Amino acid sequence: MAVADIRSETRFTYLGLREWLERVEAMGQLRVVHGANAEEEIGAATDVLQHHEGAPAVVFDQVPGYDPGFRVLVNALGAVDRIALTLGLPTGRSKAETSEGWRRRIKALEPVPPVEVDDGPVFENVRRGADVDMTIFPAPKWHPGDGGRYIGTGSFDITRDPDDGWVNLGTYRVMLHDARRLGYYISPGKHGRLHRQKYFDRGQACPVAMVFGADPLLFLASCTEIPYGVGEYEWVGAVRGEPLRVVRGPVTGLPIPADAEIVVEGFADPSELLPEGPFGEWTGYYASDVRPEPVLRVEALYYRNGAILLGEPPGQPPDEQSRYRAVLRSALLCDELERAGIPDVVGAWQHEVGGARMFTVVAIRQRYPGHARQTLHVAAQCRAGAYAGRYTIVVDDDIDPSDLQEVIWAVCTRSDPATSIDIIRRSWSTPLDPRIPPERKAARDFTNSRALIDATRPWEWRDRFPPVNVPPREVRQRALERWGHLLER
């Protein structure tokens, strides 16, 4: 598809979170709930919503004990049409088609720097110093076993590299300690942690801005594996085709979104640590326990009238997070494989059941001996597939990599356990990995192994491999269109 064609099918009908909500409501995919409490009910309802594919987005308002105008939005990206809306892509497509459309879109991107403006709606309410109180917001207790309230799940941190000035946006969990202190955990190797550690190594406090509700595209950018050194603001500007409006933070000088819902500025000091956690993480476990973690001391708080707190708590996969991350990361994985020189990649999927990280499948059209193994090793170690991976599988081009049943059928019938599985040891994992033994975590050994499974027809005798007993995919699709009415109840 030509660049002009890609751009012609990319259309943004919203600007900012509030216009996005208007579009979702027009799609019939928004519900409003009055009076649910933040201690238990919002978290419980969110768990129900995110474990039912296609469930609506829900706004909780009039939360008991808080300003009735403050709202909590959950399950915003729990349906493929809302993911497509956020990315500016056509709705009404499958998750695989949406991911492919996104892959074509990101191939044509040219960075568009943000434009700095003097003011924005985010400054409708301003609190500084001793007037800051983060407890005014209805931050829910998302999971029953959480160590506290987490105001930051659908949030992102803004940091600047002290060496080259590169500004990064990254999504990391944020715990509410008290009125002015926020604990935030960042897994090793993440860009925000690399920035923070540079300041800490110099004995300096790290300036940070945190955003707790903004344009959903900005949020997606902050939790996507954008290449090191590329700014999320520039990336979002490229996707939208126009610059993002930012305001220079009065305290840190960091650029903050002009139309964000809730923003704080402050500093993390290397000498100030508080116990953080536990928190139910994206693996579906409390795998990181409680440990001393850096604290952001909030110097300034900005928020809009009727501020919306975006809640994106992880759950047991498949959940909301894994649904939108699968669409984005699968596209990035295809792009990285192509740039690495892997030919004839016909599709890839980072499966929701593995949190869009731990179960990766790539479909190829085999071209030469070793093609499948080459694909496996690159897919398991490129940036889009490396972090916290577990199983990487390569299948033939007649298998839909996004269809878990087809993939497992290929594994069961085309792989041989003794000859089709390679193991990579000491790969990049995370303290959130539930399978790393406690003694290795104590030694800060946050690595794991990877199983690479070749579920393709063996190259040497692929022409003699038994044929499948179903028609080709396009014939099956025509049959479904012709006879699909027989499935109706």
Image (spheres, grey):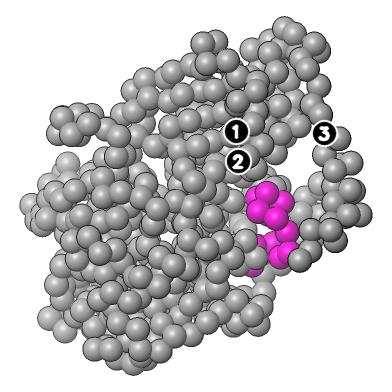
Q: How crowded is mark 1: few (under 14 residues within 10 Å), some or many (20 or more)?
A: some
Residue marked by disc 1 = 408
* Residue 363 as seen in the image, left or right of residue 145: right
Measure how far apart labels 2 and 3 are at the Cα level. Answer: 18 Å
From which residue to which does the magenta span run? 84-99
**Image side of residue 462 versus residue 486, left or right:** left
Residue at the spot of label 2: 404
Q: Do the residues labelled 1 and 2 touch (CB within 8 Å)?
A: yes
Q: Distance between the residues labelled 1 and 2?
A: 6 Å
User: Percent position (x, y) of residue 278?
Assistant: 20, 55
Residue under numbered circle 3: 470
- Residue nearer the viewer, 1 or 369: 369
Q: Which callout, 2 or 3, points at the residue further toward the start of the chain?
A: 2
Q: What residue type is labelled 1?
A: Ile
62 left or right of 97 in image = left
Task: Tell me the kind of residue under disc 3.
Answer: Val
Regarding residue 298, the answer to whether it shows in the image is yes
* Quadrant for the C terminus in the image: bottom right
Instruction: Name which residue lies at 35% across and 89% down.
Output: 35
